[in-house]
Amino acid sequence: MYRVFEALDELVTIVEEARGVPMTVSCVVPRGDVLELLDDVRDALPGEVDDAQDVLDKRDEIVRIAREQAESTVNSANEEAERLLTEARERAEQLVSEARAEADRTVAEGEAEYENLTERAREESDRMVQAGRDAYERSVEDGKHEQSRLVSQTEVVQAAHDEAARIVDEAHAEADRQRADCDAYVDDKLAEFSELLSTTLRTVDSGRNHLRGTLGPGSRATSHEYDYQAQ
């Protein structure tokens, strides 16, 4: 193809430099040189055309190979994407399972702690109530003894009654105070357990939210997920 362009350039030069015919736009060119250059163009064209056809044939082959490689690349990419998606799903299921197990363990520990605190509080309440009763009974008994001792003394009978009533009132007040202390102790322990359980449930919810963010907007949790909600 190079020789064709070179011959054409030489023809253009001959025409541009040819002597013009007066009063016309024609010119006089050397016939031999022009014919020689045209022969060169004619001889070079078949070979160049063949070369061009070879390029076209190779182009089709190259396009076919490129298409096959592209299809192979797409298939490989699809397989890799499917593998990554499968791994992501398996990891998500593992995380959900671990979170559910951790939540179950935490709830079980919380329930055990609650039962323990409740039992201890009940025992402490019974002990304090019994102590109050004992103190009341002792006070009443002391009042009775004192009343019996003073019953023969008219002037001090009223004072004995008053003292006995005071002792009885103090015993009742002490029993009420001990019962109130016991109720406050139980309430404090239950509040601590409630805070612990709320914190645990918030931690589980945070893990689930993080898991949803990792799987992306198109992900959907499995039907066996727990739906814990902090109270």
Image (cartoon, helix red, strand yellow):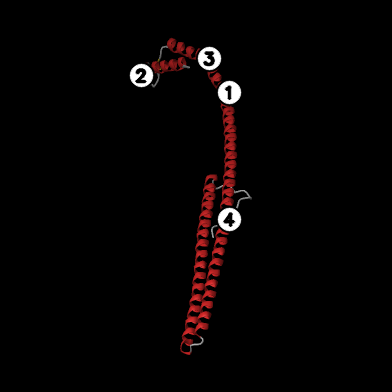
Within 10 Å of disc 1 (Cα), the crowding (few <14, some 14-19, many 20+) is few
User: Of callouts 1 and 4, which one flags the residue occurring earlier in the amino acid sequence?
Assistant: 1
- Which residue is at 60% across, 52% downward? 226
Q: Give the label on residue 61, or none.
A: 1
Is residue 7 shown above or below 132?
above
Which quadrant does the C terminus fall into?
bottom right
Separation of disc 3 and disc 4 at Cα? Answer: 96 Å
Q: Residue 147: which disc?
A: none
Q: Secondary structure at mark 3?
A: helix
Query: Residue at horizontal 54%, vertical 77%?
Result: 141
Query: Secondary structure under badge 4?
Result: helix
Tell me the residue that label 3 is attached to: 47
Mark 3 or mark 2, which is nearer the start of the sequence? 2
Camera-side mark, 4 or 2: 4
Distance Cα–Cα, label 4 vs label 2: 123 Å
Dots 1, 4 in contact, CB < 8 A: no
Q: Residue at x 49, y 73 (%)?
A: 174
* Location of residue 74 in the rendering, given as x and y in whole percent from the top left corner: 58, 33
Q: Is residue 199 above or below residue 69?
A: below
Mark nearest the camera among 3 and 4 is 4
The residue that mark 2 highlights is 22
The residue lying toward the viewer, choosing from 231 and 73, is 231
Q: Name the amino acid type tagged 1.
A: Glu
Label 1 SS: helix
**Residue hosting label 4:** 112
* Tag 2 secondary structure: loop
**Closest to the observer: 12 or 53?**
53
Q: Looking at the image, which is closer to me, 136 or 6?
A: 136
Which x, y percent locates residue 39? 49, 12
